[in-house]
Image (cartoon, helix red, strand yellow):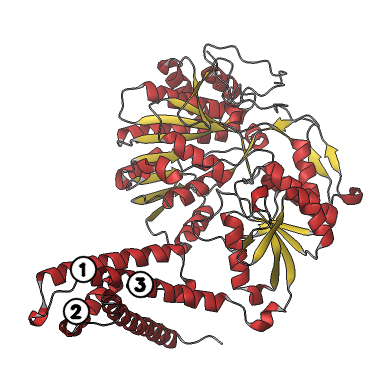
Amino acid sequence: MRLPAAMLSWRAALHRLAQVAVDVGLLFAAYWLAFYFRFDGSVPGRFEETLSATIFIVVGLKMAVFIAARLYTKWWRFTSMRDLQAIVLAVAVSSILVAAVLAQWQPGGVEPVPRGVLAFDFLFTLVLIGGVRFLVRSIVERPPRSEFFRKGRGVLIVGAGNAGTSLLRDMQRHRRQLGLTPIGLIDDDPRKRGLRMHGARVLGTRADLPRILRDRVVNEVVIAMPSAPGAARQDVVEKCRDAGVRCTTLPGLPELMRGEVTMSQLREVRVEDVLGRAPIVIDLATVARYLSGRTVLVTGAGGSIGSELCRQIAALGVRSLVMVEHSENNLFEIDHALRARGDTKLRPVVGDCKDETHMARVLAEHRPEIVFHAAAYKHVPMMELNPLQAVANNAIATEIMARQSAVHGVERFCLISTDKAVEPKTIMGATKALAERIIEMHGEGVTGTRFAAVRFGNVLGSSGSVLPIFRRQIEAGGPVTVTHPEMTRFFMTIPEAVQLVIEATGIAEGGDIFVLDMGEPVKIVDLAQRMIELSGKGDDDQITIQFVGIRPGEKLHEELFNVDEDVLSTRFGKIMRATRPPLDAGQVRSGLAELERIVTEGSQHRVHEVLMQTTLAGRSEPDQGETVTESTFSEGDARS
């Protein structure tokens, strides 16, 4: 039964008053104990007068500090280490304040309070105020005697680090509601074997997992290793599958929100969890300081990359976030999602980047210091059928946004690019390659804006990517369609890609093309097979893989660098800088003007020719039958 709001507010007020009353009593006790211990249990008469004359002053001053420190806005049963830090700070400040006041004023001419009393008072106040809160939490979390004999579903936690122990604590705190019983933990560190954490023992390492699953009643295995590489997760998944035990996982580090790890964050293991690459860990709050207190504009804010950019940027202390999106529904979704988590400095704008008049008005009104241009068409076959729209949205709109950003004093402008722009063979790839050339051209110009493009490969789970397509095919019972058994692609999660985009933009100098370390390329057929296995339908050939052949213009292996580019390292190891001779600015502008005329006239027959001439000006167009058989990127790779 849900209580009325008025009754809930009264209960909360009474609860706070009870907390205040308990703390007042503890402060009286701490001050009295300070005198008692200072004088070895026998307080001289003149100091009894000091105690009586000052005790109410001491308690009053300390309570004022405690209230100002907001110690009564949270139930004691949820006290955390962060709350303990606040308590220590409040006690220290209040003790210093008391010492300062009593040093300047002695009521009634009594003896001064001895410094030993003040020291004891600090210690007793800290022990009593902090101790009572953790005592309440331990009593509340300790299950009743009947719970010790009550068994739920047995859970084994893989990972005895911070994430695993937080998960274990949350499981024990809500044992009755969840119906789960922790069997124990395993960890790859052999030194932890036999240790007890919150009452559960570390039973061994991952190598012991098959034996533990065989000897104990385990209903579910939880992977609590957010920073572990995909190979380690895959190992656990395979061992659980062999034992017929359900396996779930915490998200990777980029997906975890700030705060304690809880059972509500568990989900089924996905293919991105078991890809071989190690997750990228970035101190985003440090590398993204250039965003703090700034107005940031994101185009394509409702897309896969744009929406994640908005999520991460909104959490970095920006003054305001302008979200430009031509799809009203997509803009509503990201705006609603951000406001639901408490973000309020949002400025949603329905607009099309091809509309220069509107974009100029938006930039003039909001005056952003940083622009992330993520708006683009990205589906290769669809753009082959609609080349004029590809040119207009991917190339001409980039020129409009870059030009207007320079006019309106934007400090940094970042284009989100793609590996399809490397040695392009398709309309979509060529338009993104031209967009990169536009960034280089503006970077060479004399403006106050630092232009950059960030190039990366496929992002797992983005709209229209291979993962959602495979997932739908598996749910439909197959077959899963793969173009070629040897086809490979680079993959990265959306949060990882966005973190690196934000990081790279911070080091832009002008006209930079940054390329993200995508790790090793992944065979598409292996990706499909892993997805089938994770779905639980991989046995007995329930789901088959069907090879359908490479589509026109599609490469067998994608590249991350053009043949005429030099690869330089940056101070961020996961970000490389691609340099090459810039195209003549007049030639680029002339080609753009011709493309604008073609788009306006709606003439498709010359668009491919003019697009390739403008993009590859001064270079020979690569053979359309060419395929690249090796990745051109590896860790630490550099060309001269």
Left or right relative to 338: residue 103? left
Q: Amino acid at mark 1?
A: Arg
> Which numbered disc covers residue 57?
2
User: As displayed, is residue 389 above or below residue 511?
Assistant: below
- Residue drawn at the location 74% of the way across and 67% of the way down: 154
Q: Quadrant of residue 160?
A: bottom right
Three-letter code, disc 2: Ile
Which label was assigned to residue 115? 1
Q: Is residue 574 above or below residue 254?
A: above
* Quadrant position of residue 81: bottom left
Query: Considering the numbered disc 2 on the image, is that residue within a helix, a strand or a loop?
Result: helix
Q: Is residue 122 or residue 92 the one in the foreground?
A: 122
| Residue at which label 3 appears | 71
Q: Which of the two residues, 552 or 37, is positioned nearer the viewer here?
A: 37
Q: Residue 388 bears which disc, if any?
A: none
Secondary structure beneath label 1:
helix
| Residue 122 sits in quarter | bottom left
Q: Is residue 355 visible?
A: no
